[in-house]
Image: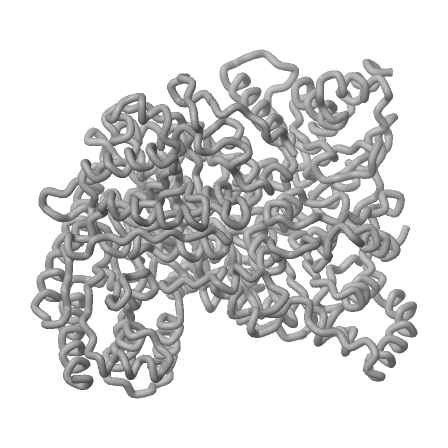
C-alpha cells in the first residue's frame, strides 16, 4: 500500500496551501492503493512527447514511433476493413444509403442495421443487453463456430468492450463483505486490466504460472498448487483462463473447475488469432458441452469476445459481449439489472459486432474485398515467423514458438549490470529496457512486469499485428538497440 | 512441438478418468451445486434497481411483441415515454455532427464533394489525433488530448473566461460512467464510517443504483414540490445531521437542470449549496447533462464551476468538485454514442493518480463518442459554411422542446388530481397524482406500489409507458410518474389527452 500518512494540506488549483482537504489518499476506496501502478502512464506520456517532438522537427535516430504497446491493430498501422467502415459511415449519415459511391450490399446492410435501431438512428439507446437482432446474430455465430451447439440469446450481453462485462460478472461474483475475501485464479502472465478489475473490487488474485518452457502452457498441477496457496488467504470462487494464446488443456481445466467449485471466466478475445498449421479454434463452451453430463449441465462459464482484436481491430468502438452458460436464472435477473443501469453499449460498436459475426458471404458484392482478412491473417502468420526468427538470433533474447494471440512475449536475459542500473533509476529492469528502447529505438513496447512473470525473469511484450514493412522496421530497430544495450551493460 | 489443440489425444487420455468421475457422480458422491447462487453472489448487486429500464419497460416490450404478433389491443403502438431518448422519439440528429462522424468512420469520403469543407477539416483534425489515424484505435484512458483541450476551451468560454485545465478533464462512456467512477473512488470505510452520499429526492435512479452497488449509504434530501422542486439548505442540513448518526457523509450530488423534476436552480441556490458543501466538508458532484435544456422565462443555467470561482479563492481553492456533461441530451440527443466527460476541481494530485488507474481498467471511452463530444464543444462558427444549418437545427430542437414543456404543464394542470410543476428544463415532467384510497388498497392487494399499479394500468389500457415516481423517490404518501416530453408535438398532444382521460377513468373506477 502507498503510504497513507499525509499531512492534511495539499496544493490546489491556484497553488495556495489549503487545510482540511476532503479527499486525500487515505479518504478513498482503499482497493485503489492495491491496484498496481502500471508503467504504462509514464511510457505513454513519453511516447506522446516524442511524437510531438518529431512533429516539430526534432532530430532523432528515427522518423516515427512504432506503437506496438497495446493489442491495437490500427494503432500499429493495420487498416480497418473497408466493408465495416462503409456500413458504419452509411449508418451514421443515412443520406449515404442513396449514394452510388457505395456498393449495393453496403447500402442494403446499413439500411438493415438502421431498421433495427430505435427511431432509425444510431443515436438512440438500445435494449440493455444490446440490439435484439444483433444479440441473435451473435448467438447464431457462436452456434456455427461451435459445430451446432445451441447458444441462447438471453444468455448474451453486449457491453462497451469486454473488460466492461468482465467487471460486471466479477462484481456479481465478489462478495465485498466476505471473510476470507473472494479469490480469483489468474494466469501469469495475464492481461493487466482483468487483474486491476479484481483488485478494484476488493478481491484477491491467486496467480498460477504458465509454463514458459512449454510455450506458456497451462498445467493443471500448477492450478492445484495455486489453489493450495490460497488456503487461509482467500476463498477462490473463479478461475480465469485465456483461450487461445497458450497451450490449453481444456478438459482437465473444466474438470478442475467442476471439482473445486470454480466459476470459469474464459477470455476468448483472440479466437481469430490462431496461426499454426491445422490449428482450429475450439471454445471452452464447445468442449464443456462435448464432455457431457455431469459437467456440461453444471459448470458455470462466462465466455468473453469483442470487436477489438481479430481482423476488425476496432478497439476504439468499444463493443464486446459475454455469453453466460449454466447460470442460475435468479442470478441472471440481477445480472440483467446490472447491465441495464449502464444503459447500453455504443450502437456503432454493436453494429461492428454484427458485421463481425455476420460478414459478407460469397456472392455479395463486398465479399471479394472482405477477403482482406485473408491478407491480414497472412501478415500475422508471417510476422509471427519473423519475430521468432529474429529474436532467437539475438544473444540474451529468446522467444518460444507461438501459434496464437496478438503478442510476442520474448524473454530478456539481462545482465546484473543492467538490473543494477534499473534499480538505481527506481525502475523494474524490463521497464528500464522498454524506456531505453522507446527513447533510442522509437519502439513503444511494454515491460513483462505489467503482466506478471516469474521472479527474476524479464520480458517485453509487443503486438505483432502490424503491416509487414512496419514489422521489419521494428525488428531492425529492436535488433540494433538490443545489441547496443547488451554491449553497454556487458 | 506439441500442437495446441490435440483434443482427441486429451479425450483419450482423460476418457478413463471421466468415466470414473461420472460413476462417482451417479453414485451421488460428488453432486456439485452451482458456485454462483442468490446466497453466494455479491449481496449489494441484489439491492440494485433501475426503474427507467425496470419491470414496466419489460412489460411494454412484451406488449410490443404481442402487437407484432397481431394480438388485438385498444391501441396500435406502445409509446415509450419512459426514457430520455430523443432520437427514439423521432428527433433528428444534427447534420453537421453526422457528416463529420461519417467522414471519420470512412475517410475515403474526404474525397466526396458532397461534404462541406468545414466538416472535412474537423474530421481530419480528429483523425490526426487518433492512433493510426483511425477511430478504431484505442485512445489514452483519459481521452484524446486535443479533444480534452477543446472541452477545456468550451468550458472557459461558457464560464466567462474562468480557466479550465485539460488535465482535469476525463472523457467517459456517457456521463453515467464518470459519475460511477467518482463514486467508486470516494466510497470507503466500514460501519459507522461508511461513506454517505447525499442525493435529491426525487433523483435519477443511476445514483441509487450505483450507491446500492457500492454499498454506500444513500442520504436523501427532499426537493420542495410546493415550490417548483427547489432545493432548501435547511433540508440539506436536516438530512446531513440525521445521517451523521450512522455514516460518514462526504459527498453531495446535485442534478441541475433536474431529472426527473426539471427545475433549474437559481444562482443564489447554487451559491448556497457551495457554501454548505464547504462548511460541511462535502465533495460536490454536479450533474449538468441538461445544461442546454432550459426553457422557462427567467431561468438560466449557471454552472457550478462558474459560481464557485465567482465566489472567490476562499471557495474556488478549497471546494472539491466534479462536474459532468454528456452528448446524450441537450439538442444532440446522441445517447447511442455514449459520449461524455467530467471536469474535476481541486482534486488532490495523489487522488488523481488513483483516478487514472481506475479509468484505465476499461481502457478508453468510445472514440466515436469522443469525436462527437469534440464537435459539441467545437460547433460550426459564424464564418463557417455549416453554421446556418447548424443553428437552424439546434434552435428548432430546443424551441420545440420548450414548446412541449409548456404544453405539458398546461394540459396536465387542467386535470383534477394531477398537479404539474413548470418544466423549467431537462426533458421530463414529474407530476403529482392523487390516488383514491381504494386504488391504493387495490395496489397493495396486488403487491404493487400504488404508482406502479397506476402506470401498469395506463400501459395496458392505452399503450403509454411511463415510469412510476417510486422509481425516483418521493415523499411518503405522495405519488408521481415521470413522463418524457420527447414524443413529437402531435403525438405528445394525443398522449397528454389519453393520460387525462385515463386519470379521470381511473379515479372514477376507484372512487
The colour scheme is one colour
Displayed quadrant of residue A413 = top right
- Identify the residue at the far front of this view: B245
Give the quarter of the figure containing the C terminus of chain B.
Answer: bottom left
In this view of the protein, can residue A103 be seen by the observer?
Answer: no
- Identify the residue at the far bottom of this view: B72
Q: Residue at x 80, y 46 (%)?
A: A402
Q: Residue at x 59, y 22 (%)?
A: A46
Q: Residue at x 22, y 46 (%)?
A: B232
**Foreground of the two, A194 or A33:** A33
Displayed quadrant of residue A388 = top right
Please say if B269 is above or below B8.
above
Displayed quadrant of residue A125 = bottom left
**Foreground of the two, A60 or B278:** B278
**Foreground of the two, A434 or A274:** A434
Horizontal and vertical percent for residue B275?
Answer: 28, 33
Q: Residue at x 75, y 28 (%)?
A: A430
**Foreground of the two, B121 or B248:** B248
In this view of the protein, can residue B264 be seen by the observer?
Answer: yes
Horizontal and vertical percent for residue B166?
Answer: 41, 28
Horizontal and vertical percent for residue A352?
Answer: 50, 55
Amino acid at each position: 500500500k502507498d503510504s497513507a500518512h499525509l499531512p492534511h494540506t495539499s496544493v490546489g488549483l491556484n497553488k495556495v496551501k489549503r487545510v482540511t482537504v476532503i479527499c486525500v489518499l487515505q479518504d478513498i476506496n482503499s482497493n485503489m492503493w492495491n491496484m498496481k501502478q502500471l508503467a504504462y502512464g509514464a511510457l505513454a506520456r513519453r511516447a506522446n512527447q516524442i511524437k510531438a517532438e518529431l512533429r516539430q522537427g526534432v532530430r532523432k535516430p528515427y522518423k516515427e514511433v512504432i506503437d506496438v504497446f497495446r493489442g491495437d491493430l490500427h494503432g500499429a498501422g493495420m487498416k480497418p476493413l473497408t466493408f465495416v467502415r462503409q456500413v458504419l459511415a452509411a449508418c451514421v449519415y443515412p443520406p449515404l444509403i442513396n449514394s452510388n459511391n457505395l456498393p449495393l450490399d453496403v447500402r442494403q446492410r446499413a439500411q438493415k442495421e438502421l431498421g433495427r435501431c430505435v427511431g432509425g438512428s444510431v443515436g438512440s439507446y438500445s435494449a440493455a443487453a444490446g440490439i435484439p437482432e444483433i444479440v441473435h446474430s451473435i448467438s447464431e455465430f457462436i452456434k456455427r463456430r461451435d459445430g451446432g451447439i445451441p447458444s441462447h440469446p438471453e444468455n448474451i450481453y453486449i457491453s462497451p468492450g469486454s473488460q466492461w462485462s468482465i467487471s460486471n460478472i466479477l462484481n456479481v461474483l465478489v462478495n465485498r463483505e466476505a471473510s476470507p475475501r473472494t479469490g480469483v485464479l489468474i494466469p501469469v502472465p495475464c492481461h493487466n486490466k482483468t487483474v486491476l478489475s479484481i483488485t478494484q473490487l476488493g478481491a484477491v488474485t491467486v496467480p498460477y504460472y504458465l509454463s514458459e518452457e512449454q510455450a506458456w502452457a497451462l498445467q493443471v498441477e500448477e492450478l492445484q498448487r495455486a489453489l493450495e496457496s490460497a488456503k487461509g488467504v482467500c476463498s477462490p470462487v473463479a478461475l480465469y483462463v485465456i483461450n487461445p494464446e497458450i497451450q490449453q488443456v481444456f478438459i482437465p481445466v473444466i474438470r478442475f473447475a467442476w471439482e473445486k467449485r470454480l466459476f470459469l471466466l474464459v477470455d476468448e478475445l483472440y479466437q481469430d488469432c490462431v496461426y499454426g498449421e491445422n490449428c482450429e479454434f475450439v471454445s471452452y463452451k464447445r468442449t464443456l458441452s462435448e464432455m457431457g453430463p455431469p459437467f456440461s449441465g453444471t459448470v458455470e462459464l462466462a465466455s468473453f469476445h469483442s470487436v477489438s482484436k481479430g481482423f476488425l481491430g476496432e478497439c476504439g468502438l468499444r463493443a464486446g459481449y459475454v455469453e453466460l452458460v449454466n447460470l442460475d436464472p435468479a442470478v441472471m435477473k440481477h445480472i440483467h439489472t446490472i447491465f441495464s443501469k449502464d444503459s447500453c453499449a455504443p450502437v456503432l460498436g454493436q453494429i461492428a459486432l454484427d458485421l463481425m459475426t455476420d460478414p459478407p458471404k460469397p456472392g455479395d458484392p463486398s465479399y471479394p474485398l472482405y477477403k482482406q482478412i485473408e491478407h491480414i491473417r497472412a501478415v500475422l502468420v508471417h510476422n509471427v515467423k519473423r519475430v521468432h526468427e529474429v529474436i532467437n538470433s539475438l544473444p540474451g533474447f529468446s522467444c518460444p514458438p507461438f501459434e496464437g494471440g496478438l503478442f510476442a512475449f520474448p524473454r530478456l536475459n539481462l545482465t546484473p549490470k543492467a538490473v543494477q542500473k534499473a534499480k538505481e533509476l527506481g525502475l523494474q529492469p524490463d521497464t528500464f529496457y522498454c524506456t531505453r528502447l522507446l527513447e533510442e529505438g522509437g519502439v513503444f513496447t511494454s515491460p513483462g512486469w505489467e503482466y506478471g512473470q516469474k521472479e527474476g525473469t524479464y520480458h517485453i511484450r509487443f503486438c505483432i499485428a502490424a503491416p509487414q514493412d512496419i514489422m521489419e522496421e521494428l525488428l531492425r530497430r529492436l535488433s540494433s538497440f538490443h545489441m547496443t544495450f547488451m554491449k553497454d551493460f556487458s | 512441438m506439441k500442437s495446441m489443440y490435440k483434443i482427441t489425444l486429451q479425450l483419450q487420455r482423460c476418457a478413463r478418468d471421466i468415466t470414473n468421475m461420472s460413476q462417482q457422480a451417479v453414485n451421488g458422491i460428488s453432486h456439485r451445486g452451482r458456485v454462483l447462487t442468490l446466497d453466494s453472489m455479491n449481496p449489494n448487486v441484489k439491492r440494485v434497481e433501475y426503474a427507467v429500464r425496470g419491470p414496466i419497460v419489460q412489460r411494454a416490450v412484451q406488449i410490443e411483441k404481442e402487437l407484432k404478433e397481431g394480438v388485438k389491443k385498444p391501441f396500435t403502438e406502445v409509446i415509450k415515454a419512459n426514457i430520455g431518448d430523443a432520437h427514439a422519439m423521432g428527433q433528428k440528429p444534427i447534420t453537421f455532427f453526422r457528416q463529420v462522424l461519417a467522414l471519420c468512420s470512412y475517410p475515403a469520403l474526404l474525397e466526396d464533394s458532397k461534404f462541406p469543407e468545414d466538416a472535412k477539416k474537423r474530421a481530419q483534425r480528429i483523425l490526426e489525433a487518433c492512433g493510426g489515424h483511425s477511430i478504431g484505435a484505442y485512445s489514452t484512458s483519459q481521452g484524446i488530448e486535443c479533444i480534452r483541450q477543446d472541452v477545456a476551451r468550451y468550458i472557459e468560454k461558457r464560464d466567462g473566461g474562468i480557466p479550465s485545465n485539460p488535465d482535469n478533464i476525463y472523457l467517459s462512456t456517457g456521463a453515467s460512467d464518470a459519475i460511477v467512477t467518482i463514486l467508486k473512488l470516494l466510497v470507503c470505510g466500514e460501519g459507522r464510517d461508511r461513506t454517505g452520499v447525499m442525493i435529491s429526492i426525487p433523483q435519477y435512479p443511476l445514483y441509487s443504483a450505483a450507491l446500492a452497488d457500492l454499498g454506500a449509504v444513500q442520504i436523501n434530501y427532499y426537493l420542495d414540490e410546493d415550490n417548483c422542486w427547489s432545493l432548501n439548505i435547511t433540508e440539506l442540513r436536516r438530512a446531513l445531521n440525521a445521517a451523521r448518526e450512522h455514516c460518514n457523509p462526504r459527498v453531495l450530488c446535485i442534478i441541475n437542470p433536474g431529472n426527473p423534476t426539471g427545475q433549474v436552480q437559481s444562482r443564489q441556490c447554487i451559491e448556497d449549496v457551495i457554501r454548505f458543501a464547504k462548511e460541511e466538508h462535502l465533495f460536490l458532484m454536479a450533474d449538468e447533462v441538461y445544461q442546454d435544456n432550459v426553457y422557462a422565462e427567467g431561468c438560466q443555467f449557471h454552472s457550478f464551476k462558474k459560481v464557485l470561482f465567482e465566489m472567490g479563492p476562499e471557495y474556488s481553492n478549497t471546494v472539491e468538485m466534479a462536474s459532468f456533461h454528456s452528448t446524450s441530451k441537450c439538442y444532440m440527443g446522441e445517447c447511442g454514442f455514449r459520449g461524455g466527460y467530467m471536469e474535476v476541481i481541486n482534486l488532490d494530485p495523489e487522488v488523481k493518480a488513483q483516478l487514472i488507474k481506475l479509468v484505465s481498467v476499461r481502457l478508453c471511452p468510445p472514440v466515436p463518442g469522443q469525436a462527437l463530444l469534440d464537435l459539441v464543444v467545437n460547433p460550426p462558427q459564424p464564418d463557417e459554411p455549416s453554421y446556418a444549418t447548424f443553428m437552424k437545427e439546434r434552435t428548432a430542437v430546443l424551441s420545440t422542446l420548450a414548446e412541449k414543456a409548456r404544453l405539458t404543464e398546461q394540459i396536465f394542470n387542467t386535470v383534477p388530481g394531477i398537479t404539474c410543476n413548470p418544466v423549467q428544463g431537462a426533458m421530463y415532467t414529474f407530476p403529482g397524482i392523487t390516488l383514491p384510497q381504494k386504488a391504493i388498497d387495490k395496489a397493495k392487494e396486488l403487491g404493487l406500489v400504488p404508482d406502479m399499479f397506476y402506470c401498469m394500468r395506463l400501459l395496458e389500457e392505452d399503450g403509454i409507458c411511463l415510469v412510476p415516481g417510486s422509481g425516483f423517490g418521493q415523499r411518503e404518501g405522495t405519488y408521481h410518474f415521470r413522463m418524457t416530453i420527447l414524443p413529437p408535438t402531435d403525438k405528445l398532444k394525443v398522449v397528454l389527452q389519453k393520460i387525462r382521460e385515463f386519470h379521470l377513468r381511473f379515479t372514477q373506477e376507484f372512487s
